[in-house]
Image (tube, helix red, strand yellow):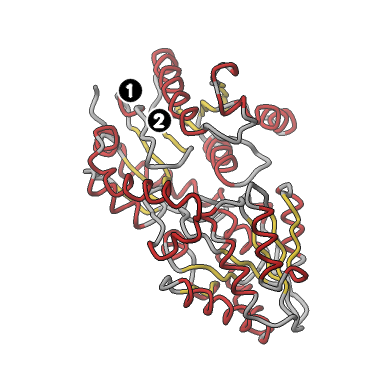
Amino acid sequence: MKILLVGHAISPRRGSEHGHTWNWARVLALSHDVWVIANPEFREEVEDELRRKPQPSIHLSWVDLPRRLDWWQLSGRRRGFGLHYLVWQEMAFRRARAMHANISFDYIQHVSIATISAPPKLWRLGVPFIWGPIGGGQTSPGSFLKYFRRERISELARTARVRMLHFSPALRLAAQNSALIMATNCETMELLRRAGAANLQPFLDCGLPSEYISARPIVRPPTTGITLIWVGRFLARKGFPLALEALAQTDQTIRLMVVGDGGKRKEWQKLAASLGVGDRVRFLGTLSWDRLSDAFDEVDGFLFTSIRDSAGSVVLEAMAHALPVIALNHQGVAAHFPDNATIKVPVTSPGEVIANIAAAMRQLNESPELRQRLGEAAWRFASTQVWENRIPLAWSMINRIAFQNPTKES
């Protein structure tokens, strides 16, 4: 078949959405001809990978805004992404329309950026349109808004916008004209239903390359005195202060390794010091995907505190390293990650959540057997989530549903 993928973010050497787009293209191209419209932010990484491991069935089409007109590029990719992406989507749609006129695609799939808030117009091209996997329908629990501090107003505005999003004509048109929509969490599923989507399927948006999974789970020393790892961008919605406040309720034998960076680094370092845990927290900054993989092997557990997140690719990456996971029990974590590999903390009040995270930390510290049991279950689950398995599964779903429900032509 001739397939068009549209994914703003793409790279074979990065996780999250960049890796998602690359792996959809890579695996589908084993059996089909695949064209990809993408932003050239990491074009060199993609082209270098294709030189080293040629895949003649992958065809790249790069779309970018003029630098002088794009605040996202002028600001060093720190600000203005929302406007950049809306303009980029319009340019990508026009490129897709021109390509379809020459190539006649069998179906078109939008894979990134995976948010419900920016519905694409690709359904207008008159062939089956697959949207997703996507998230973005989740909102922050109201009692946790205090962790947004200066961003509280903008988070409240986002919550109000998402709750009204099902009235958006653009979303309703995309939802109702998609042959299939794959949604990452239940909140996004429900919002799409309210927008009139007919063909919805739950589908975790992340996966792993098969070579990322070790032949057997790591066996860590059965000692007390553990190190946990937290990974993410330093954004308010990632909830990192919950990790620090929980750590402060444990003893000196538990330590925390922190991977990531952003504008809140100094603020969070000061918070660690004020809570008396500054000497137990190591801020490592941003690590490459390969170096992060090494860091996972050096610790005893993974901590995921996102207040708002579609699912969390990094959770799956940690599980591949046989790490037991402590996470808030909502959104993508609640929908997809198994209970026998994860200590899921009920999302109640901030005080209760912090106390329960601390209790989970102490459990892992005091029981090497529990760490090993959860870690082995995590590794087994991650082993089932390699792209070489997930995308054929998605393909069978697309083949079964999408081609029995052709899209309407504009």
Residue neighbourhood size for the residue with mark 1, other residues' Cα within 10 Å, grouped as few (<14), some (14–19), many (≥20): many
Q: Decide which of tag 1 and tag 2 comes sooner along the chain.
A: 2
Report the disc number at residue 108.
2
Residue neighbourhood size for the residue with mark 2, other residues' Cα within 10 Å, grouped as few (<14), some (14–19), many (≥20): many
**In the displayed structure, would residue 259 be above or below residue 91?**
below
Type of amino acid at the residue the image marks with label 2 = Ile
- Which residue is at a point 71% across and 72% down the rendered structure image? 277
**In the displayed structure, would residue 97 be above or below residue 258?**
above
Type of amino acid at the residue the image marks with label 1 = Leu
In the picture, the quarter occupied by the C terminus is top left
Image coordinates of residue 149 in percent, x first then y, are 50, 55
- As rendered, which of 363 and 267 lies closer to the eye? 267
Label 1 – label 2 distance at C-alpha = 9 Å
For label 2, the SS is strand
In the picture, the quarter occupied by the N terminus is top left
**In the displayed structure, would residue 61 be above or below residue 152?**
above
Choose top left, top right, bottom left or bottom right for residue 73: top right
Q: Are marks 1 and 2 in contact (CB under 8 Å)?
A: yes
- Which residue is at a point 56% across and 67% down the rendered structure image? 242
- Which residue is at a point 54% across and 21% down the rendered structure image? 63
Q: Is residue 152 left or right of residue 254?
A: left
Q: Which residue is mark 1?
A: 125
- Which residue is at a point 37% across and 40% down the rendered structure image? 117
For label 1, the SS is helix
